[in-house]
Image (cartoon, rainbow, N blue to C red):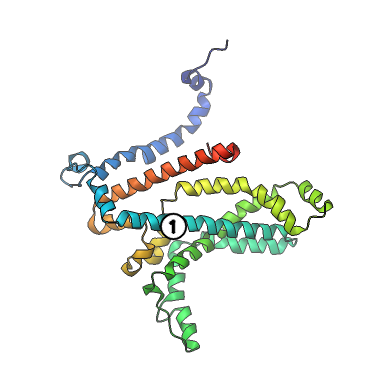
């Protein structure tokens, strides 16, 4: 019978490897785990004089206020809704573009197209805000300037909350399309040509080859990206929302998410307890969701699960 070795034996045996990962462990310990003590703020009414543990303990009062006021449910609805739309739309368009590029034979055209689609990923959100403003500004924006040219009625986009539901999704897809497309294109490149040659011999046309070979082969990549995205489904794209919407209260009903609410709570009222309660709900929900979905995927097909 082989005696089971403990952690100390493993540490002594691979001390060089453990030493190599020590900086990473220290980094996460300092920047990710040590700050978790701040969760206690969610159960207090923060007082500058008392500090963290000297502030009055109020239990679940912060959570009760968020739930009773309806603020938390609206924020959760917006955050989940937008992130779900982001996941579906960006993956759908990325798979489509990756398949289209993989079928193009001209190498120069393929490289130029890849670069053009990938370029928006490097554009900062500040610059994205400038682009949006120059497009939709009521007085001098490109949209209204064009409408005035044809003697049509100008559109006040910055006072139209429902319009930003589609605009935010469109801007997100435009900015991230190239990044996800490269991932799917790399997966397609790794598919053996033998599958396609065999399909051609059997008389399969290009659409049948894509449907029965390419798309099924992309499924594991999609599932991994989906699970990674799902883990942060309650974590909104703060830079995108804050830069494009800012403090425009007229748009908050359809564009306010948990991240922007937490930021404004700290910026305007400095209500640390309320902001931490919203952030804790956000993290707990995301953790439970990713564990649940990963479990369900593991039950159906273990190969697609993260852990």
As helix, strand or loop, the secondary structure at mark 1 comes to helix
Determine the residue positioned at 27% across, 56% down.
265
Q: Is residue 251 above or below residue 121?
A: below
Left or right: 217 in relation to 261: right
Q: Position of residue 172 (x, y in %)?
A: 49, 61
Q: Is residue 216 left or right of residue 43?
A: right
Residue that numbered label 1 is attached to: 81
- The residue positioned 50% from the left and 18% from the top of the image is 9
Rendered location of residue 290, percent (x, y): 46, 43
Q: Is residue 229 above or below residue 114?
A: above
Residue 71 position within the rendered picture, expressed as x and y whole percent measured from the top left: 30, 57
Which part of the image, by quadrant, shows the N terminus? top right
- In depth, the one of 29 and 307 nearer the eye is 307
Any part of residue 187 in sight: no
Q: Is residue 112 above or below residue 66?
A: below
Q: Quadrant of residue 158 in the image?
A: bottom left
**Residue 48: x %, y % from top left:** 18, 47
| Image point (36%, 68%), residue name | 251
Q: Residue furthest left?
A: 49
């Amino acid at each position: 019978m082989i005696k089971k070795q403990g952690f100390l034996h493993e540490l002594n045996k691979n001390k060089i490897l453990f030493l190599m990962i020590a900086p990473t462990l220290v980094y996460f310990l300092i920047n990710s785990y040590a700050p978790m003590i701040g969760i206690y703020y969610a159960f207090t009414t923060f007082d500058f004089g008392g500090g963290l543990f000297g502030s009055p303990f109020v239990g679940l009062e912060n959570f009760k206020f968020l739930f009773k006021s309806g603020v938390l449910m609206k924020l959760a609805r917006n955050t989940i809704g937008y992130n779900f739309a982001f996941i579906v739309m960006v993956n759908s368009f990325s798979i489509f573009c990756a398949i289209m590029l993989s079928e193009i034979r001209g190498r120069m055209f393929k490289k130029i197209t890849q670069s053009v689609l990938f370029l928006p990923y490097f554009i900062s959100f500040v610059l994205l805000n400038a682009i949006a403003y120059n497009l939709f500004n009521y007085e001098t924006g490109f949209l209204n300037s064009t409408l005035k040219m044809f003697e049509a009625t100008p559109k006040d986009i910055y006072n139209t909350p429902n319009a930003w539901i589609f605009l935010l999704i469109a801007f997100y897809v435009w900015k991230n399309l190239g990044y996800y497309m490269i991932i799917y294109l790399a997966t397609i490149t790794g598919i053996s040509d033998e599958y396609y040659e065999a399909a051609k011999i059997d008389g399969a046309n290009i659409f049948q080859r894509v449907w029965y070979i390419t798309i099924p082969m992309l499924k594991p990549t999609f599932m991994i990206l989906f699970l990674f995205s799902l883990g942060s489904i309650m974590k909104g794209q703060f830079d995108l929302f804050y830069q494009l919407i800012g403090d425009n209260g007229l748009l908050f009903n359809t564009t306010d998410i948990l991240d922007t609410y937490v930021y404004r709570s700290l910026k305007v009222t400095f209500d640390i307890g309320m902001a931490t309660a919203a952030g804790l709900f956000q993290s707990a929900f995301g953790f439970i969701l990713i564990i649940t979905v990963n479990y369900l995927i593991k039950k159906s097909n273990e190969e697609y699960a993260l852990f």
